[in-house]
Every structure is written in C-alpha cells, then in structure tokens.
Image (cartoon, rainbow, N blue to C red):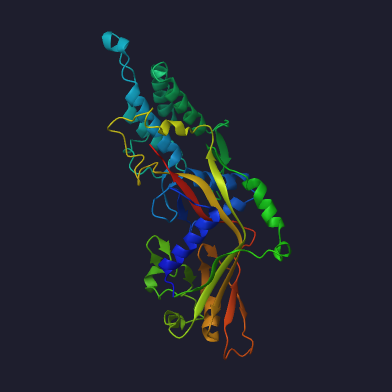
Amino acid sequence: MQSDSSIWQLYRQALSNWAHVTGSDVLSVAAIDTFSDLGSSDTGLCNWSIYQLGNGIPSPTGSYAPHSGLFSSYWIYLSYLLQNVAPVPVHLQENASAPPPQVNFERYRQLLLTTLPPQTAIAQNGLCPASSTPSTADLAAVHQSMTSTFINRAPQIIKALNQCWLASLQEPTALNMVVSTADATASRCPGFTLEQWAQTLPSWRGSGLSALRSNAPTALLNAVDIVLPSVPDSTLGAQLLTTADLPSFIGLNLANPMHTAMCSLANLSNTSVTMSLSLEQFGSFALSPAAWFDADFFDGSRYIAPPNAADFFSENGAIGLLPSHAVIGFRPHLTLRVSNLAKAQDLANSVTRIGPFNLQATATVQLPADAGGSSGEVDIHFDAQDSNLPVLLGVISRQVLH
C-alpha cells in the first residue's frame, strides 16, 4: 500500500509526464493554493493570480511555496550590476569642488523593498535589511539621481532600471497591468502573461461530458492502493497532517460530530482502499513577464555583480528558479474503492479533499452488485466544490544558468 509520501510522488511523476517536464526543469506541486481566481470573470482578480504565479519564485523543495519575488529581486540585481560597472565618474574624482554623485546603492535597495506595494515586494529572501518608513518620492529622487549620473557609463543597465520603474507605477503603462483582490480596490502590478489561458478556459467550460464519451479522461492515478492518514492530535486540526512540505493526500474532516467513530479510519488493516483520479481537461501554460524583464542580464560572461552582492542564483537564491509554466487542471473525477461498506459510508461523509481538489460536502456511494454490501467493492465518487473552476496543479520552473 502507498503512504502519503509515495502517493504524492506518484502524483508528481504523473504530472511531470503529462506536462513533459524534462532536463533541469523543476515541477513544484500545488497542494493548498489552487488559484481558483484564474477562472474569475473579473479581469483584475484573474490578473492577480497570474501575477502571483509569474512573480513567485518557488522554493526548490518540490512543493509549491514561493519564497521570493521575481520583480523586486530582478530590480535589486540590476542595481548591483550598475554598482559594479559604474564607479564615481573620473571628472568628479578630479574636481574637488564638485559634489559627489547623490547615489547610495544600499539606500536605493532599501527603498525598493519598503516603498513598493506589499503585493509587489513579497518575501525577499534576505536581499537587504529594511529601512525606516520612506515615501515613493524618496525612491523617485534616488532613482533619478542614479540614472542621470550613470546614463553614459552603463546605458543598457540604466534602460533596464527605467523599465522596472515604469512597471512599478500605479499609472497605466505598457509594462504593468490592473489587478484586484477580493478585499481591496484595483491597483497595478508589473505585467505578466499566462499565454493562451484566456482562449482555453472558455473552450474547457464549453466541453461537457458528452464531448468526452468517445475519449475518456486520462487517469493521473489509476487504482492506487492507499493507506489513509492516521488520526491527528485534535489540537492540530483536520488538515494539518503533513508529509515533508505537503499535507495528507486525502484530507479528512475528523471533527464531523456525526462520525464520532472516525478514529476507526486509522485502522484499515482489513479494508482495501484504492484511489483513482482523472481530469477532463489539462494544460501547461507559459508564464511570461512583460518587457520590463530581460534574461540577458543573467549572462555571467557579460554582467558581473560585485562580491558583496546578495545571493541570487544558488538553489535557494532569490532568483534560483524562474517560473516558466503553470500546470492547470479542470473538472476532476475522483473515486475511492473500498472493500467495506461501513467504512465507505464513513469516508463518503468525511473526505474533504483529495490532492489539491476540495470536494463537495456529499459524495455518491455506488453499492456492490448484491446491493446489501455483504460482499464486493464499494465505489465512492467525489465531485469538486465547483466544477467550473480551474485548479492549479503545479508550476514548472527553469534553473537560471549564470
């Protein structure tokens, strides 16, 4: 029988095969944050999900958990490149009466992290310490001083920094996009594109089961023998059983007062349970930053950061991985096959999640042939909470070769 850890491994391998993950690409499996707003008719809400997917740099653990942000990390990286190639101009060094250029690179980086909107400057993985409360005007002043001082010394880097500046503005530009959250007014974030998504989702929603009768959904997991999770400490809650960085593959509502005997689910030594999971629709969609981003600056043979630069490109660095594709599924089919009717009924009323899919409160129990349940296997069919919402299955990232 498969444990939680091995089920997640089987699931991850199946996703990798479906999405054609090869070479040095890394698939980060989504278990909790399913980004259902990708299916919202509100452009701002959908864009907010796209921004988070494109901007979030995943940890290299195999489970989807962003630990830094591409936009602000890239902007800070550019500032280090400029610092390395743009020393104090010679004419200022020789002219003692001339004031030194008003550029403090460390101050500039502090202003970036503390002035950008919180949703833009997400966790920065220790790029630089925070400063006192600044204003956008402070950042604008330092940025203007720096760009005007070094425009002739490093025009390409200055142009890239100005692109980041334009993308960060709350005024509409070609480099940003409108976003909104459920509890906030609309704002603007640096632009990202989830290619072909706007065209694909309507076609998915328009394809009902009738269109699939001659071509059944392909199974991600097919009749996998499983071991259900043990009963957790009641103080931890029903969904906090963990295997490494992932929750239990099958989430149980152990607090359901109608099933005080749920502890018996921890002992299934005489009960066979298999799980099957398939999807009606599946796709891997490219994530692309707008023109504020230029990966050419990651070419270590042309651009070199100073020795005191932050860690950017190691496995756990701020830009250790670059999100390249979002793997998205639609309308899952979920079945548990149980050799004991009583256990099947308990499971039908207690399973709340299978993998990343949150389930409806009720499930369909299909009795065995004798209809009495004294022999044969019982199938429990589960439906997603909302069959019209897409679910993020994972994010594919590529390693930055520097």
Query: Where in the figure is residue 271, as x and y percent of width and height?
Result: 48, 83
The residue sitting at 44% across, 72% down in the picture is 2
* 313 sits left or right of 55 in the view: left
- Place of residue 73 in the rendered image (x, y in percent of width and height, measured from the top left): 40, 38
The residue shown at (50%, 78%) is 273
Image location of residue 385, percent across then percent down? 59, 65
Classify residue 251 as left or right of residue 362. left
Looking at this rendering, what residue extends furthest in the front direction?
23
Determine whether 167 is above or below 253 in the image: above
Q: In terms of depth relative to the viewer, which is nearer, 88 or 157? A: 157
Percent x, y of residue 40: 62, 51
Displayed quadrant of residue 116: top left
Image-quadrant location for residue 109: top left
Residue 180, compared with residue 331, is above or below; it is: above
Position above or below: 275 against 192: below
Q: For residue 242, which quarter of the picture?
A: bottom left
Identify the image quadrant of the N terminus: bottom left
Residue 204, above or below 142: below
Image quadrant where one finds the C terminus: top left
Tell me what residue is drawn at x 35 percent, y 43 percent.
317
Looking at the image, can residue 334 be seen? yes
The image shows a total of numbered marks equal to: 0
| Residue 184 visible somewhere in the drawing | no
In front here: 386 or 316?
316
